[in-house]
């Protein structure tokens, strides 16, 4: 065997080195562990509930807690929340979450340890206006933003507290949208504009985030951010906070979070994380902690933690089988293993072993959408050690395209192994992805761990454009493994087989009960395959994050709902008690409704 030596063969990726930024007494970046955080869900004006939810989060391992401050009045109440926490012996750092209100940010900065601002709406309102900006007009807008943001920067510098510049894909300003489009580049530029203002005031206690509900967009934006920071210079080494917005609930929310957050941790990117679930926020912490533990060791005091991913941080001169900054699926030949089309634009297929098929053959008619499509032993799949240059050369010399995968037992991390395979084989060869390279037979294994490993490994590769079929080997239960395979494909945006929901986590801005409402909407619409519905507690991320949703359900005022088609509001101030029914009526009006199939209640 001739070993393959290329930039892709390194077996470990060092965690990106950053400066340390403090939130209270908690260090972010530098030599610190990857921090886990969450956000309370109650009304900020309810002081006792805010204190108790913060204590509950800290008790389950949240190292930083975020609290929304939608108004100056809410921001003032942060003083009493902080005093109440101190009286109970808690010094957990508090972050004020600010949208739309620079005056609320100034008030909050008096009391908290860190302020999060959204550059898309801190000094801009979003009207989806189409306007061409001349360079002079654009510069004038930047000067206006400078006037609004500089007082906060100077006050935070004076108090010695930090700022997170938190870009959301769903709330880019009209100015950014018109110049850069609804793109990862627009997200990065939006944040860098604010960072330059901070740096002009000699302020460097900055943390960045690039959140999106679409994992492909989120991954590309963070990689592009890190690339841009590196190019700006060594003193732009600011930490980053990772999160997938509107991930949803249950298995789907955990899968989507693992795809986005896990992929970046495996690139060595990320200094603090939040998993955003449409559930009580205490349930977010175990998922976040598990992701950190699975995707990389928590760095020691010297910052020497290693991430077993196999790639250096994105740079322009490192060859790789995918573009780290934009999605393009490998353009493979079309094959017909077992009579099922694979590759050449076909949706990724779900593969099972013969033993798995034998276990479930008697109940396939009761498994609904979770159907095996290809049997591994019948598909003539070539098993490759991607480090073997001779084997790769022989394969590429064959005139016919082959269905290929990484051989079980190869001693490489999964993501690295498949990136090496994609780099070594001609693009014409379709690739089967496996979640693990050693099949599990442990029926008592931790399913959350299995889910996070599979979602991170397969989801990361799908978002890189690698993969034409998937095989789950880490979950021995056949029905559960099939469900996991299909749900990963859906969460990665690679294959839609059921209703898709974009549902935000609850917070103090939320204008209705998100968990109850999401359950009602799922019950009413869960049979609508291929329909994407956004469920937003308020307007902060509503229209923008719903840009690729078919329909939206958004809190407009207490007890009132606005309904959207795409990003356009079409029904206003609907009483909450009527809103789910009105949503289904709207879906009917647009020809997307189907009656519930016979036999399903």
Image (cartoon, rainbow, N blue to C red):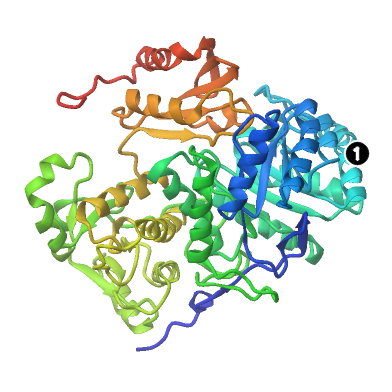
- 76 or 545, which lies in front? 76
- The residue located at (58%, 28%) in the rendering is 542
Q: Is residue 34 visible?
A: yes
- 346 or 235, which lies in front? 235
Q: Is residue 168 visible?
A: no
Quadrant in the picture for the C terminus: top left
- 502 or 132, which lies in front? 502
- The residue located at (28%, 67%) in the rendering is 404
> Which residue is at the far bottom?
1
User: Residue 145's x, y, as percent?
Assistant: 84, 35
Q: Is residue 249 above or below residue 373?
A: above
- The residue located at (48%, 34%) in the rendering is 503
Q: Quadrant of residue 501?
A: top left
Instruction: Find numbered disc 1 in the image and state the secondary structure of the residue it sits on.
Output: helix
Quadrant in the picture for the N terminus: bottom left
Q: Quadrant of residue 588?
A: top left
150 relative position to 433: left or right: right
- Crowd around label 1: few <14 · some 14–19 · many ≥20 (10 Å): some
Q: Is residue 345 above or below residue 543?
A: below
Q: Which residue is mark 1?
A: 151
User: Residue 294's x, y, as percent?
Assistant: 48, 65
484 relative position to 352: left or right: right
Q: How many marks?
A: 1
Q: Quadrant of residue 7?
A: bottom right
User: Residue 303's x, y, as percent?
Assistant: 68, 73
> Which residue is at the far left?
362
- The residue located at (30%, 47%) in the rendering is 486
Q: Is residue 23 above or below residue 179?
A: below
User: Residue 391's x, y, as percent?
Assistant: 31, 81
17 relative position to 547: left or right: right
């Amino acid at each position: 065997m001739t070993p393959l030596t290329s930039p892709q063969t390194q077996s470990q990726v060092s965690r990106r080195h950053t400066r340390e930024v403090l939130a209270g007494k908690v260090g972010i970046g530098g030599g610190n562990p990857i921090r886990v955080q969450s956000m309370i869900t109650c009304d900020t004006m309810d002081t006792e509930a805010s204190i108790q939810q913060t204590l509950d989060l800290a008790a389950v391992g949240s190292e930083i807690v975020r609290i929304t401050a939608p108004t100056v009045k809410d921001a003032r109440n942060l003083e009493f929340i902080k005093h109440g926490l101190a009286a109970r012996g808690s010094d957990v750092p508090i972050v004020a979450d600010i949208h739309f209100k620079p005056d609320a940010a100034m008030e909050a900065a008096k009391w908290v340890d860190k302020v999060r601002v959204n550059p898309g709406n801190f000094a801009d309102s979003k009207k989806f206006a189409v306007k061409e900006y001349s360079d002079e007009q654009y510069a004038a807008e930047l000067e206006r933003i400078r006037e609004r943001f500089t007082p906060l920067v100077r006050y935070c510098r004076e108090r010695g507290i930090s700022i997170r510049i938190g870009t959301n894909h769903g709330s880019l300003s009209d100015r950014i949208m018109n110049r850069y489009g609804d793109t990862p580049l627009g997200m990065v530029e939006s944040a860098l504009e604010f960072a330059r203002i901070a740096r002009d005031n000699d302020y460097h206690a900055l943390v960045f985030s690039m959140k999106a509900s679409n994992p492909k967009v989120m991954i590309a934006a963070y990689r592009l951010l890190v690339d841009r920071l590196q190019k700006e210079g060594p003193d732009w080494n600011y930490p980053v906070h990772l999160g997938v917005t509107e991930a949803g609930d249950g298995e789907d929310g955990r899968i989507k979070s693992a795809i986005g957050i896990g992929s970046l941790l495996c690139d060595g990117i990320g200094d603090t994380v939040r998993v955003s679930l449409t559930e009580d926020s205490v349930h977010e912490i175990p998922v976040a902690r598990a992701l950190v533990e699975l995707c990389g060791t928590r760095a020691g005091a010297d910052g020497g933690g290693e991430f077993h991913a196999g790639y250096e941080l994105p740079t322009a001169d490192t060859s790789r089988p995918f573009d780290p900054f934009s999605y393009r699926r490998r353009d493979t030949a079309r094959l017909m293993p077992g009579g099922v089309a694979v590759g050449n634009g076909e949706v990724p297929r779900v593969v099972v072993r013969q033993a798995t098929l034998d276990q479930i053959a008697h109940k396939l008619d009761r498994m609904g959408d979770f159907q095996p499509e290809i049997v591994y032993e019948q598909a003539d799949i070539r098993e490759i050690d991607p480090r073997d240059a001779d084997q790769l050369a022989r394969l590429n010399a064959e005139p016919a395209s082959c269905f290929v995968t990484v051989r079980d037992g190869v001693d490489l991390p999964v993501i690295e192994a498949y990136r090496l395979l994609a780099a070594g084989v001609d693009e014409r060869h379709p690739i089967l992805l496996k979640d693990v390279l050693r099949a599990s037979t442990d029926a008592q294994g931790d399913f959350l761990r299995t889910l996070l490993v599979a979602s991170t490994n397969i989801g990361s590769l799908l978002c890189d454009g690698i993969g034409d079929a998937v095989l789950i080997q880490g979950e021995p239960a056949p029905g559960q493994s099939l469900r996991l395979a299909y749900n990963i494909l859906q969460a990665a945006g690679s294959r839609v087989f059921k209703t898709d929901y974009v549902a935000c986590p609850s917070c103090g801005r939320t204008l209705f009960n998100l968990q109850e409402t999401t359950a009602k909407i799922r019950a009413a619409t869960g049979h609508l395959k291929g329909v994407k519905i956004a469920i937003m507690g308020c307007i902060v991320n509503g229209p923008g994050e719903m840009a690729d949703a078919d329909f939206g359900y958004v809190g407009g005022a207490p007890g009132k709902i606005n309904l959207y088609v795409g990003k356009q509001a079409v029904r206003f101030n609907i009483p909450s008690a009527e809103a789910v029914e009105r949503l289904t009526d709207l879906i009917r009006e647009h020809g997307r409704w189907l009656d519930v199939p016979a036999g399903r209640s």
